């Protein structure tokens, strides 16, 4: 559905997007992540035909977005970061107007508007003036607009930006539902959200791709660097030196101590799990254990690891 090859965008001498390439298959929900200023919006604006690239190529649904822009754009529903809406019209009127702009007429226009209202949970708001809507409902109108001509691809730029946790949940559910029928490229800062909705994640930083994989693989590869949390009742120095001598253990880091109990992070080699060996060793020495837990990485930790500045 999307093929991006060596896409670059310069603003003067500054490279906002630096030679990125990635693909999004039909039906995938792809999370496009990166810290502020990473180049996400610039990339999405190029892919939706709003911004010409400095160099590189992108095709949407087989059409070159720069050479065959109109055809490519017919395949895209784009929800920009700040949804521009007219305040002094009613929700349904606005969507009908947008449907007309997208070439829909008569019954088709009415049906598509009805479906978009329904899909985005806006039926009961259809007669409301846009200026009276909460931010969450304004976002829904933006989404309804993006899907009104039922494009195969939805490009959503931070659809949950500025929403409260309840609104975020409902937009997340909506994205999940939309993902059943559409290919979706969604940029967001809310990583737990991506973990729940995305089949694939692209992480960008300083205009470059830092990782591109399924959320599971990204997390697994982090987890492979295995960290075990151990809380044990024994002399801290003895525990540390004993465990550090074990195979596959890279480092034992004392974290805290409370009365006789000492807590450690045990860092192990990729793909290994030393919990049983640690448990056996503790039993042999008669050291009681209160916690022996393999830490599960989150997408947030992967993100921080790949994009942190320090
Ligand atoms: N029109 C412009 N002229 C000059 N620099 C720009 C322009 N638009 C964006 N930039 C710069 O390009 C970089 C990438 O911006 P972009 O908006 O694509 O980032 P982003 O990943 O979407 O960030 P955010 O998460 O904050 O929205 C930033 O350093 C930004 O300041």
Image (spheres, grey):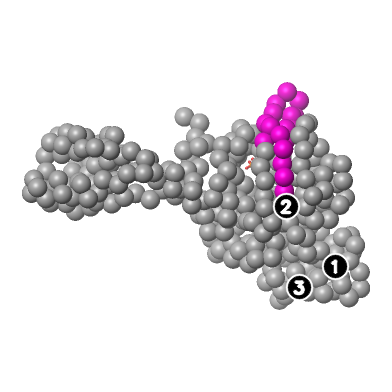
Q: Nearer the viewer, mark 1 or mark 2?
A: 2
Label 3: element kind: helix
Residue at 78% x, 45% y is 59
Q: CA distance from mark 3 to mark 2?
A: 24 Å
Whether residue 12 is in magenta: the answer is yes
Q: Residue furthest top?
A: 13
Q: Which residues are magenta?
A: 1-20
Which residue, given by chain and number where applicable, does mark 3 sit on? Answer: 115
Quarter of the displayed picture in which ligand 1 can be seen: top right
Label 2: element kind: loop
Which of the 4 image quadrants contains residue 148? bottom right
Q: Is residue 283 left or right of residue 83?
A: left
Which of the 4 image quadrants contains residue 251? top left
Q: How many marks?
A: 3
Residue at 33% x, 38% y is 269
State the mark number for residue 1.
2
């Amino acid at each position: 559905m999307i093929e991006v090859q060596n896409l670059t965008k310069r603003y003067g001498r500054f490279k906002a997007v630096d030679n990125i390439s990635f693909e999004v298959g039909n039906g995938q929900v792809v999370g496009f992540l990166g810290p502020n200023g990473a180049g996400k919006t610039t990339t999405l604006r190029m892919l939706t035909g709003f911004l010409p690239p400095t160099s590189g190529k992108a095709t949407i649904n087989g059409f070159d977005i720069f050479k065959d822009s109109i055809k490519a754009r017919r395949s895209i529903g784009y929800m920009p970061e700040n949804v521009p809406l007219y305040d002094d019209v009613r929700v349904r009127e606005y969507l009908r107007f947008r449907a007309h702009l997208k070439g829909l007429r008569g019954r088709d226009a009415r049906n598509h508007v009805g479906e978009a209202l329904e899909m985005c949970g806006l039926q009961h708001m259809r007669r409301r003036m846009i200026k009276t809507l909460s931010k969450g409902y304004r976002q829904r109108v933006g989404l309804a607009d993006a899907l009104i001509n039922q494009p195969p691809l939805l490009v959503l730029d931070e659809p949950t930006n500025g929403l409260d946790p309840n609104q975020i949940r409902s937009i997340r559910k909506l994205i999940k539902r939309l993902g059943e029928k559409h290919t979706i490229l969604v940029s967001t800062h809310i990583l737990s959200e991506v973990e729940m909705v995305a089949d694939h994640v692209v992480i960008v930083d300083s205009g470059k791709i830092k990782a591109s994989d399924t959320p599971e693989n990204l997390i697994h590869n982090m987890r492979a660097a295995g960290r075990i949390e151990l809380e044990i009742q024994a002399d801290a120095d003895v525990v540390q030196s004993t465990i550090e001598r074990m195979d596959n253990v890279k480092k034992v880091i004392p974290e805290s101590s409370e009365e006789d109990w000492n807590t450690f992070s045990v860092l192990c080699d990729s793909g290994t799990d030393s919990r049983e060996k640690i448990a056996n060793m503790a039993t042999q020495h008669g050291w009681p254990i209160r916690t022996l837990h393999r830490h599960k990485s989150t997408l947030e930790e992967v993100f921080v690891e790949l994009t942190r500045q320090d």
